[in-house]
């Protein structure tokens, strides 16, 4: 299918393509032959994508080419050779605590920007979303999944922990007990369960995934941008505030909106 003339490609490198169509940006994982397995270079490209978004963008769609969204970390990371030009994970383990912490923090940056208040991010997930792939889907605000989706957090099965920012949103979505069970067993979560327990906002047939995401993006763009930004900030902060603190935050946000609508904003 030809790319619409309105779509502008910002970059395409290291397994990540960023394109922009007015208020909607699409970040695509482009390693279908490896089921979009992830690497440090791919993570740096994802971080760059977040930094490269034009100010006009309000919705960011994350998708993966091919049959799988992302099968997780490329196992080459665990070989003595690692990736060309990169320290292997075995080499990283031999570093100091501070060095190891700094490297993991850099990796995590690829997963943090999706929840910025000025955008709403949607993961369009099909096939396997395993480990780092699951965590990348969890990094987004919303998830639309195909009926063939298979989520799994396999890190514990490998003697590791989910460390790419996935634990906080997972507990927030499904609760502590179910999150522990999913992570500790490494089992697969299909589309029906994902929608039922809140991992997915919507589950659709695979051939309807793109159109469902387009419809959701259009609905998100229908409200004034500043109102969506303020609402997202309120909702994101709610779990860290008490009831009275949230009331105060709501009043302050509404005051800003009323002044803006009345043309009295600073």
Image (cartoon, rainbow, N blue to C red):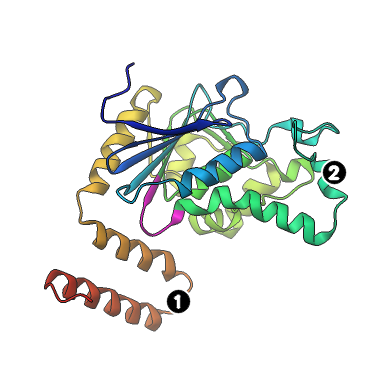
| Location of residue 96 with respect to 156 vertically, above or below | below
Q: Nearer the viewer, residue 152 or 162?
A: 162
Residue that label 1 marks: 241
Q: On the image, which quarter does residue 84 sit in?
A: top right
Residue 167, how many percent across, how many down?
Answer: 60, 55
Q: Nearer the viewer, residue 60 or 165?
A: 60
The residue segment tinted magenta is 115-121
Relative horizontal placement of residue 202, taking residue 112 as reference (left or right): left
Mark drawn on residue 151: none
Residue 161, how many percent across, how many down?
Answer: 72, 50
Q: Nearer the viewer, residue 265 or 243?
A: 265
Sort mark 1 into few (<14), some (14-19) or many (20+) by Cα contacts within 10 Å.
some
Residue, x 47% and y 49% (percent of image)?
A: 51
Examine the structure image and report whether residue 123 is included in the region drawn in magenta. Answer: no
Mark drawn on residue 91: 2
Residue 130 seen in the figure = yes
User: Which quadrant: the C terminus?
Assistant: bottom left
Residue 22, how many percent across, how many down?
Answer: 27, 40
Residue 164 seen in the figure = no
Relative horizontal placement of residue 165, taking residue 260 as reference (left or right): right
3D distance between C-alphas at marks 2 and 1: 41 Å
Residue, x 62% and y 31% (percent of image)?
A: 37
């Amino acid at each position: 299918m030809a790319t619409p003339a309105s779509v502008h490609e910002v970059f395409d490198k290291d397994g990540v393509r960023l394109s922009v169509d007015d208020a909607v940006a699409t970040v695509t994982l482009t390693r279908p032959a490896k089921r979009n397995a992830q690497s440090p270079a791919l993570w740096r490209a994802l971080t760059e994508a977040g930094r490269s978004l034009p100010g006009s963008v309000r919705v960011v769609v994350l998708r993966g080419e091919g049959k799988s969204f992302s099968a997780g970390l490329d196992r080459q990371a665990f070989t003595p050779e690692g990736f060309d030009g990169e320290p292997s994970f075995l080499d990283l383990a031999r570093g100091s605590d501070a060095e190891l912490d700094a490297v993991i923090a850099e990796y995590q940056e690829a997963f943090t920007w999706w929840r910025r208040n000025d955008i709403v991010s949607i993961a369009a997930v099909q096939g396997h979303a395993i480990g780092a792939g699951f965590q990348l889907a969890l990094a987004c605000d919303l998830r639309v999944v195909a009926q063939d989706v298979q989520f799994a957090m396999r890190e514990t099965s490998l003697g590791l922990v989910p460390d790419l920012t996935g634990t906080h949103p997972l507990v927030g979505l499904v609760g502590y007990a179910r999150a522990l069970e999913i992570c500790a067993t490494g089992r697969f979560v299909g589309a029906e369960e994902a929608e039922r327990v809140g991992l997915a906002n919507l589950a659709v047939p695979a051939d309807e995934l793109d159109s469902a995401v387009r419809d959701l993006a259009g609905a998100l763009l229908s409200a004034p941008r500043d109102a969506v930004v303020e609402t997202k900030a309120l909702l994101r902060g709610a779990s860290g505030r008490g009831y009275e603190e949230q009331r105060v935050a709501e009043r302050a946000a509404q005051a800003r909106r009323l002044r803006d609508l009345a043309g009295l904003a600073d």
